[in-house]
Amino acid sequence: MKNKDEYIFECEGIYKAFGGTQALADVQLHVKKGEVLALLGENGAGKSTLMKAVIGLHQPDAGTMTFEGKPYKVKGPVDAMKAGISMIHQELNPEPHLTIAESIFLKRESTAGGIFLNKKAQNKKAQEILDQFDFPYPATTVMGKLSLAQMQMVEIIKAVSCNAKMIIMDEPTSSLDSEETEHLFSVIRDLKKQGVAIIYISHRMDEIFEICDSVAVFRDGTYVGARSMDGVTRDELISMMVGRQVKNVFPKVDCEIGDVVFKVEGLSGQGFDDISFEVHAGEILGLTGLVGSGRSETMRAIFGLDKLDKGKMWLNGEEIKVKNPKDAIKKGICMVNEDRKNYGLCLFRSIRENISLPNLPAKQKGLFINQRREKKECKEVADLLTVKAGSIEHNAFSLSGGNQQKVVIAKWVMANPKVLILDEPTRGVDVGAKSEIHTLMCQFAAQGMAIIMISSELPEVMGMSDRLLIYHEGKLNGEVSRAEITSGAATQEVILAKEFGGK
């Protein structure tokens, strides 16, 4: 028998359907005071749907919720926040023109006499909170100037500043480096001591085992079960999540490495300096380093998103200059951006339109698009990447995170690139979809494609790379071969030390 007094939040018999799709069926969840409960499940398992119901973004069709022993029902996130429940969303929606202070206190602004905004007091209070987190920017900084990782930290700070009694964290470390992640874990441990409950949603198993006390597993909109972290194994959790055994999350297949396809020398720009490397046909070249170390910045400049101050690039032995992404695509260089929501997808367009968008010139005859050919080829590439959807005419917004990522990859695969840059290709993706994406990467490499992969997850970048380049503060600080990784000569500790500037 469970002691109800120890639970701060409970839900029983929750059902939720969208049209003919049953998203949640007889779901339950029990969260203790002062515990970190991991919520696991593949994308589309119902985790986010339940959490949106908890904060009032969805209203359950049936079932009950209680918070602090009382019936709980809210109309939206503001009500939930007032009740003592806050949520940090995986997909950030920052207002770029607001300051950090305005973002932290949005919808709970400091007022003078209850009428006028007291900006000075609000900025001062926000700065005090930021100082507690050693945040490097003043409270008056505009959100649009921050990186994705820094915006993520502001959201975390905002949730903590609400004095919430329960905080839902949806993939909170997806944009954080190892140092920022450890800082977050320190904050979580302090919150636990204060009796705050944390619901922690993550696909990063190492984090689950490090920071969580217990775990609840969802599959296909149903509740599978809950376990204490003591004694449970990684394989058991994966089996509970997917209903089958996933033997190898990093299914690296050794491919024949061909000639040099792409080469750069002395690349310099905003956030990186004097970068030189080459990547071969059939090779997966991994890039690792702390967030802000220059990995993504280098790739953005190569793809023409950002300005390249100096340096040279060669494609198949011919020197090239890239002025913008359109130019890069024409030359055969494509890039999957780390922020699929803002830079990878038109969420309210169909799967077909998203896949077609950068490939329309090839489907065009005069002023018209060959729609029959477009639909046929889009369906073929969606099937190749096993995009799970009823139809390619469904909106991208309706897809799970893993399937959205497959659509982003699909549009570039259709372009038949010579060089494919993948920036955090499995960010926010469940273990099953992650394994599928890794398998696809090996298939592309086997066809002779040169792949450059950026990942903040060391096990991933070590497991999938033929060679690994290590960034530190905008410069390359080492190279590791696959042989060194498989032999154990290059461990996570060795690579992490180089990320922090060691030799």
Image (cartoon, grey):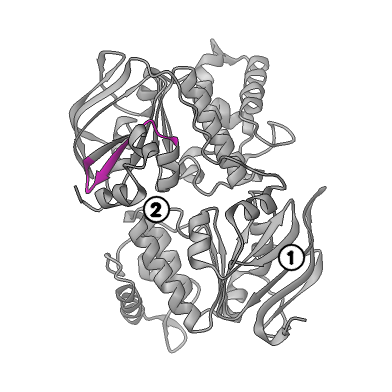
Residue located beneath label 2 in the image = 148
Count residues near mark 1 (Cα–Cα under 10 Å), then give few for <14, some for 14-19, many for 20+: some
Residue located beneath label 1 in the image = 59
- Circle 1/circle 2 CB separation < 8 Å: no
Q: Nearer the viewer, residue 451 or 320?
A: 451
Measured as percent of width and height from the top left, residue 336 is found at: 45, 35
Q: Please say if 44 is above or below 225.
A: above
* SS for callout 1: loop
Amino acid type indicated by mark 2: Leu
Q: Nearer the viewer, residue 381 or 141?
A: 381
Residue 472 in magenta stretch = yes
Measured as percent of width and height from the top left, residue 365 is found at: 56, 10
- The answer to whether residue 224 of the structure is visible from this angle is yes
- Magenta range is 464-477
Q: Left or right of 210: which side holds 120?
A: left
Measured as percent of width and height from the top left, residue 480 is found at: 30, 37
Number of marks in picture: 2
Count residues near mark 2 (Cα–Cα under 10 Å), then give few for <14, some for 14-19, many for 20+: some
* SS for callout 2: helix
Q: Left or right of 196: which side holds 376?
A: right
